């Protein structure tokens, strides 16, 4: 199915999405993107449907051709303080803050959002597979977060973050069992399946 250009016609519309919500460590990263009305790229889709190479190809194209874009990071201490849902929404708000053009309408991937500066918004489940600006935001959020996790991998290579990007893979959880948690892990998350079982 071809992505749609806009949800509302004839307005300045920003799409926003986040990456890293289900990870055990590192920041949640959000992006907001305003695209020109005639924007098109044959690869553009929900970032989860793309290969890493395709996302890396799309990122500079999006950045060079967008009317405006912004990327924001909310780190693990804040995630633990306010919870991952609120941190995700905060990250999206901060990404919208960075837009050099003020949107008149905001479309959001998912079904949860909070009013941003009295600008009307619409939440769209699987919006990153339906609307170009949300798909573009998903690509930016994912690539920026992946780049960040590669940097953290250099500091803590045993956790294989270069490969798993902080998601709860078996290898990641095995490393937590063996080496413990790092300063980048989200302590409010269930880092290990047996974490809350009592030894009786």
Image: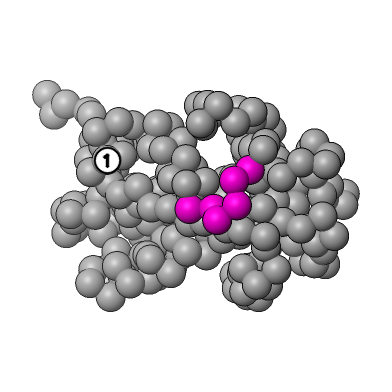
Q: Is residue 96 above or below residue 81?
A: below
The secondary structure type at the circle numbered 1 is: helix
Q: Position of residue 34 (x, y in %)?
A: 66, 53
The answer to whether residue 192 is visible is: no
Q: Is residue 53 visible?
A: yes
- Where, quadrant-wise, is the C terminus in this rendering? top left
Residue 166: % across, % down: 38, 56
Residue 190 colored in magenta in the image: no
The image quarter in which residue 152 lies: bottom left
- Kindly identify which residue carries mark 1: 78
Front one among 49 and 16: 16
Q: Residue at (52%, 65%) from the top-left corner?
A: 143
Work out which residue is located at the far left of the displayed protein and give it.
Answer: 200
The residue stretch that appears in magenta: 98-103
The answer to which of 192 and 128 lies nearer the viewer is 128
Residue at left 80%, top 44%?
6
Q: Position of residue 103 (x, y in %)?
A: 63, 43
Residue appearing at x 30%, y 49% in the figure: 75
Q: Quadrant of residue 192?
A: top left
How is this picture coloured?
one colour
Q: Quick one: 52 or 175, which is closer to the camera?
A: 52
Side of 163 relative to 155 (left or right): right
Residue 196 sits above or below residue 50 on the image: above
- The correct choice, above or below, for 170 with respect to 149 in the image is above
Q: Is residue 110 left or right of residue 22?
A: right
Q: Residue furthest right?
A: 1
32 or 57, which is in the foreground? 32
Q: State whether the magenta stretch is mostly helix, strand or loop.
A: loop
Left or right: 33 in relation to 37: left
Left or right relative to 125: residue 154: left
């Amino acid at each position: 199915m071809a992505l749609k250009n806009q949800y509302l016609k004839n307005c300045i519309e920003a799409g926003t999405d986040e990456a890293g919500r289900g990870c055990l460590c590192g920041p949640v990263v959000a992006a907001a993107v305003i695209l020109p009305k005639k924007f098109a790229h044959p690869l553009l889709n929900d970032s989860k449907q793309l290969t890493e190479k395709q996302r890396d190809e799309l990122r500079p194209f999006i950045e060079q051709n967008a009317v405006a874009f912004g990327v924001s990071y909310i780190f693990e201490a804040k995630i633990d303080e306010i919870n991952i849902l609120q941190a995700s929404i905060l990250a999206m708000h901060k990404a919208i803050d960075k837009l050099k053009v003020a949107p008149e309408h905001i479309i959001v991937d998912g079904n949860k959002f909070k009013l941003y500066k009295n600008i009307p918004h619409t939440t769209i489940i699987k919006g990153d597979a339906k609307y170009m600006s949300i798909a573009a935001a998903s690509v930016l959020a994912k690539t920026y977060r992946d780049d960040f996790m590669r940097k953290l991998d250099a500091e803590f290579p045993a956790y294989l973050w270069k490969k798993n990007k902080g998601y709860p893979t078996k290898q990641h959880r095995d490393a937590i069992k063996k080496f413990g948690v790092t300063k980048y892990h989200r302590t409010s998350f269930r880092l290990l399946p047996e974490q809350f079982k009592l030894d009786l």
